[in-house]
Image (cartoon, rainbow, N blue to C red):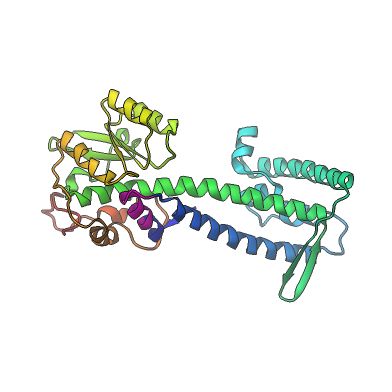
Amino acid sequence: MTVTGIVIKNIIRKLLAGQDYRSEVLTLINAEFLQYVVDFFKRITLAKLDNEKVTVDWYRKELLCSDSLSKEEVAVHSGLNMKTISNMYNSASKQIVLEASLEHYDTLYDAINSLTKQDNIDVALTIKFRDVSVNLNINESLIVINTLAVKRSALRGGYWSTAGKQVEKPLMIALCALFKVPKKYYDQRNLPESQRESDFYLFDDTGKDYPGEVKLMGKGNPESADAVYARDSRFLVANKLSGTNKQQTDSEGILWVELQTENGYKRFEEVLKTLSIPYQPFTGDLQGTLDKILPVILSDDVQDSVTPEVVLTESEQLNDSGSELLVKF
C-alpha cells in the first residue's frame, strides 16, 4: 500500500501549520474504497453470470477457491482480515488462509441463513453492468455487505499506518531544511545497523548521533511514549502530545515538539540548540518556503518506499562534504 507524494506533501504542510492532517488520509481511503467497490461488483457480476446454471455455491467457488486470487483477496472475501488469521493460526500461508477463510465463510453463511429464516426479512441487491443485471438474494447480499465492511476496515488500518511511516523522514528533512541545518547533520544514508531502529537521526560536529522518534497519533496514545523510551531517543516529534506525555519526556530528559499547536514546529529550534546542531532561526513565510523545500524532497509520484532516496540527493562533485544546505532560500 502506498501514499502519493502529493498527499505526503499536503500532510507535511498541515502538520507544520498546526492543522489536523487526517482529512488527507481519509480522502485516500474513500477513493481507494470506492474503486474497490466498483471492481468488486464487476467481479461479482461476472462470477454470478458464469455460474447462474450451476447449483454449487458460486460465491464460494469464484471468490474463495479460485487459483487466480491472492491470499489477501480470499481472506477479505470470506469476511476475515490477514491480521486475524495470523493471530489465530500463527501463520498466514496461502493454504492456512484458504482453510481459515472457507471455515469462516461457511460459519458466516450458516449464521446469515439462520437469521434470515428466523426473522423473515428480505434484502436483495441488483447489480447492473453493461446493460446486464444480476440479482443477489438476501444471503448473498449480506455476504457481500460484510465483505465490503471488512475491506473498508482493512484499508483504514493500512493507510493510517502507511501514511505515518511514509511521512516520518520527509517531515524531519523538511524541518531541518526550514531551519537551514546543513545536510551532513541529518544525512540518513549508510547508517550502521545499530542505528536503524529509530525514525530519524541528527549528528553533531563530533559525529555523535542523536536518535529521534516521529509519531503521528491521537492525543494521549501510550504507544508513542513507549517507543521513545525503549530506543533511548533524545527527541520526539509528534502531531499531538498529552500533558502526561510531556511530563514523562521532560523527566527523562527527552526533547519534544508538538506540531498541532500554534507555531508548534518552532520548538524544533530548541532541539537543535540543545543538541548543538548548527541552524538558523526561521522567521519567514512558512507555506511559501515549503513551496521551495517540498519539491526537492518529494516528487508527486507514488512513493513505494518509506524512505525515498530523493530526499537527500548529494552533489556528484568529489569534494562535496555534505555541509551544504538542501535548499537555499
Q: In this view, does 101 lie above or below 299?
A: above
Give the residue at the far left of this rendering: 319
What residue range appears in magenta? 9-19
Q: Position of residue 114 (x, y in %)?
A: 86, 43
Q: Is residue 326 left or right of residue 297?
A: left
Q: Position of residue 19 (x, y in %)?
A: 37, 50
User: Which residue occupies 32% across, 58% down?
Assistant: 298
Q: In this view, does 128 lie above or below 68?
A: below
Give the residue at the far bottom of this rendering: 131
Q: Where is residue 143 in the image (x, y as percent from the top left)?
A: 75, 51
Q: On the rendered image, what quadrant is the C terminus found in?
A: bottom left
- Residue 15 included in the magenta stretch of the image: yes
User: Which residue occupies 28% across, 54% down?
Assistant: 311
Q: Is residue 144 visible?
A: yes
Q: Where is residue 68 in the image (x, y as percent from the top left)?
A: 66, 57
Residue 200: name its quadrant: top left
Magenta span: predominant SS is helix
- Residue 324 included in the magenta stretch of the image: no
Q: Is residue 250 above or below residue 167?
A: above
User: Which residue occupies 63% across, 52% down?
Assistant: 70
Q: Is residue 164 left or right of residue 279?
A: right
Residue 205: name its quadrant: top left
Residue 134: name its quadrant: bottom right
